[in-house]
Image (cartoon, rainbow, N blue to C red):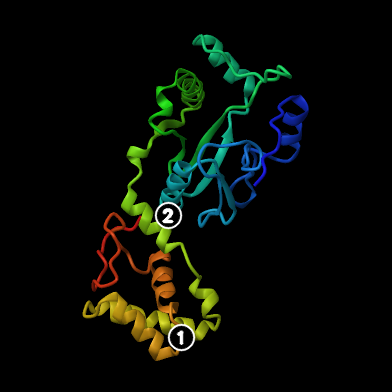
Amino acid sequence: MAKRTRIWNEAKYRKYLAEGRGQGELMEYKPWVQVQDFPSKGIVSRVKGRTTGRIHHLMSNLELRYFLLLDWSEKTMDIREQFPLDEISDAIGIADACGIRYPYDNVSGFPYVLTTDFLITVNGGYVARAIKPKTELQKLRVREKLEIERRYWLKRNVEWRIITEDEIPNTKIRNIEWLCSGNDFRALVANRDLARKCEKSFMEMYGSEEYPVIEIIHNVEETYGLCGGTGIALFKHLVCSKSIELDLNKQIDLSEQRCGVGNGA
């Protein structure tokens, strides 16, 4: 995807405001920074969220991996990525108070709007997270901008912290990626009565703890004349809807009877 020329000035700032960037919640939220705006290290992603039902703009693989954890968790009520520190004068004042040079555009002289990678709504309010590889934290300028961000959220009584690759559980991420991949069972079996029969049959066999999951998959496909792969889509659907709870910190193994029962949140 071609990136637009990076221009920042007051006109662009007002254009972003008019577009509603950094505003709204859930389906209506628009991130301040979007994947088409700026170059980004790593691979940028546009991913539809289960929690919000909208497309999320993620600027690195690390952001994507953390987003998958947030989107899977039952504690997450809303996810707003690239959230602006939109009270610019306050952010500039924070920078001045701690002797940090606030970022201004070299051409226009207009101040940039800093962003937090994720502002997350949870039951107790909000938490803010900055997602950075450990190598980036060795750079003074990165640490300075993070300090502005930290103090900005501290003034608003919002918990803020940095997430690095060390805090991303690889096995759990791989499981979530697999569960969310492939065809949707509800699209493969559009007949609602048939879909309910398949789900009931699967859960009855799964609950007996007598059969490996792969055997249940094949049994449901054969019993109801489903195409190959539909049974796996059904299993994924049941896990994603939390009808089946798994310990996602353990690699999913379809040859097991229960695939590692546990807390999938």
Quarter that holds the C terminus: bottom left
Residue under pointer 1: 226
Q: Residue furthest right?
A: 11
Q: Which mark is residue 27?
A: none
Q: Quadrant of residue 30?
A: top right
Q: Position of residue 116 (x, y in %)?
A: 53, 33
Q: Position of residue 57 (x, y in %)?
A: 58, 45
Mark nearer the viewer, 1 or 2:
1
Residue drawn 25% across and 73% down? Answer: 255
Between disc 1 and disc 2, whose residue precedes?
2
> Which of 114 and 7 lies nearest the eye of the viewer?
7
> Which of 92 and 1 lies nearest the eye of the viewer?
1
Q: Residue furthest front?
A: 2
Q: Is residue 104 above or below residue 187?
A: above
Residue drawn 21% across and 80% down? Answer: 210
* Left or right for 14, reference 253: right
Q: Is residue 18 above or below residue 244?
A: above
Amino acid type of the residue tagged 1 in the rendering: Leu
Q: Secondary structure at mark 1?
A: loop
> Which of 171 and 25 lies nearest the eye of the viewer?
171
* Left or right for 32, reference 99: right
Q: Residue furthest left?
A: 210
Q: Which mark is residue 72?
A: 2
Residue drawn 22% across and 77% down? Answer: 209
Q: Quadrant of residue 4?
A: top right
Q: Is residue 241 above or below residue 118?
A: below
Amino acid type of the residue tagged 2 in the rendering: Trp
Q: Quadrant of residue 17?
A: top right
Q: Position of residue 1 (x, y in %)?
A: 64, 47
